[in-house]
Structures are given as C-alpha cells and as structure tokens.
Image (cartoon, rainbow, N blue to C red):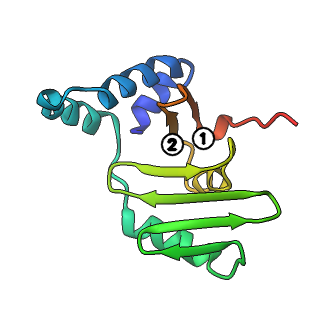
C-alpha cells in the first residue's frame, strides 16, 4: 500500500478491505476503472529485487525451495506447505495453515503490506499478526 493509505486506513482496515474486495469482485467490463483505483492505492512491487532477497535469505534452509516464480516452504515439523508467488501488483500466498511462515518473511520488508483472504473474508496488516496459542 502507498504510505498515505497506510496512514489513512491503519485504524480502519475494514474500510480498506471492503474497497479491495469490491475490486476483487468487479465485473470484467469495469476492470479498467478498478485497475486505476488499485494503482492509486498501491505501490508497484519490485518483483526481481524482492524475489532475489527472499532466495538469498532462505536458499540454504532445508524447508525452502524455489520452483520457477514460486518460493516454497515445506516444513514437515509444522505440517506446513506454503507457496509464495510475487507479481508486480501483489503477492499471493497459498498455504495449508492459518499462519504461513511467509508472513514473517514479508514483514521483514516493511509494514505497509495488507493481507486479504477474500474467500474466508479475513484481513489484517502484516505487522498486526497475533497468534493465539
């Protein structure tokens, strides 16, 4: 997210989620309007730089692998399989857990990441993660 929108929506993430959900559910004929709004809200991701930083940090870890554009954590001890794909406009995480190890990775690169799970209607700022034991 752009810094000004982080400040604007920091205390009201529900409003930001509703805007992004509306963009996610937008009809095909309205995509150009949605694209413009999305570009106003977000910063373009430096895909190659972020991809390289993640690979350099984790390439020696046994639980980590990289397959094409996908970064994979396959942690047998936590029974976790998480796949992170970096695009220019967003980062996609597919995981079998509620809490992916990739959340820790993303949080190292800043606090302006807003996580949305449109299927389960969940959302949070990356630095607001709280795990209940």
Q: Are marks 2 and 1 in contact (CB under 8 Å)?
A: yes
Residue 24 lies in what quarter of the image? top left
Q: Is residue 19 left or right of residue 94?
A: left
10 Å crowding of disc 1: few (<14), some (14-19), many (20+)? some
Q: Is residue 68 above or below residue 122?
A: below
Residue at (42, 74) in percent of width and height: 68
Q: Is residue 32 above or below residue 88?
A: above
Q: Which residue is mark 1?
A: 126
Question: Where in the figure is residue 89, as x and y percent of width and height?
Answer: 33, 49
Residue 57 lies in what quarter of the image? bottom right
SS at mark 2 in the image: loop
Q: Is residue 18 left or right of residue 125?
A: left
Q: Is residue 31 above or below residue 105?
A: above
Question: Where in the figure is residue 19, as x and y percent of width and height?
Answer: 36, 22
Q: Earlier in the sequence, mark 2 or mark 1?
A: 2
Q: Nearer the viewer, residue 40 or 77?
A: 77
Distance of label 2 from label 1 (alpha carbons): 6 Å
Residue 4 lies in what quarter of the image? top left
Residue at (47, 30) in percent of width and height: 118
Q: Is residue 113 left or right of residue 42?
A: right
Q: Nearer the viewer, residue 84 or 113?
A: 84
Residue at (64, 65) in percent of width and height: 73
Location of the C terminus by quadrant is top right
Location of the N terminus by quadrant is top left
Disc number placed over residue 113 in the picture, else none: 2
Residue reaching furthest to the bottom? 60
Q: Nearer the viewer, residue 18 or 48?
A: 18
Q: Is residue 56 above or below residue 84?
A: below
Question: Where in the figure is residue 115, as x and y percent of width and height?
Answer: 53, 38
Question: Where in the figure is residue 91, as x and y percent of width and height?
Answer: 44, 51
10 Å crowding of disc 2: few (<14), some (14-19), many (20+)? many
């Amino acid at each position: 997210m752009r810094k000004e929108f982080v400040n604007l929506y920091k205390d009201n993430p529900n409003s930001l989620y509703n805007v992004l959900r509306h963009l996610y559910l937008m009809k095909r004929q309205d995509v150009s309007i949605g694209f413009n709004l999305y570009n106003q809200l977000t910063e373009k991701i430096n895909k190659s730089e972020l991809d390289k930083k993640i690979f350099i940090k984790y390439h020696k870890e046994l639980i980590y692998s990289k397959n094409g554009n996908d970064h994979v954590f396959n942690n047998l001890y936590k029974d976790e399989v998480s796949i992170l794909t970096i695009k220019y406009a967003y980062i996609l995480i597919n995981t079998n857990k509620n809490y992916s190890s990739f959340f820790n990775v993303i949080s190292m690169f800043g606090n302006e990441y807003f996580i949305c799970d449109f299927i389960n209607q969940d959302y949070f700022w990356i630095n607001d993660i709280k795990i209940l034991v």
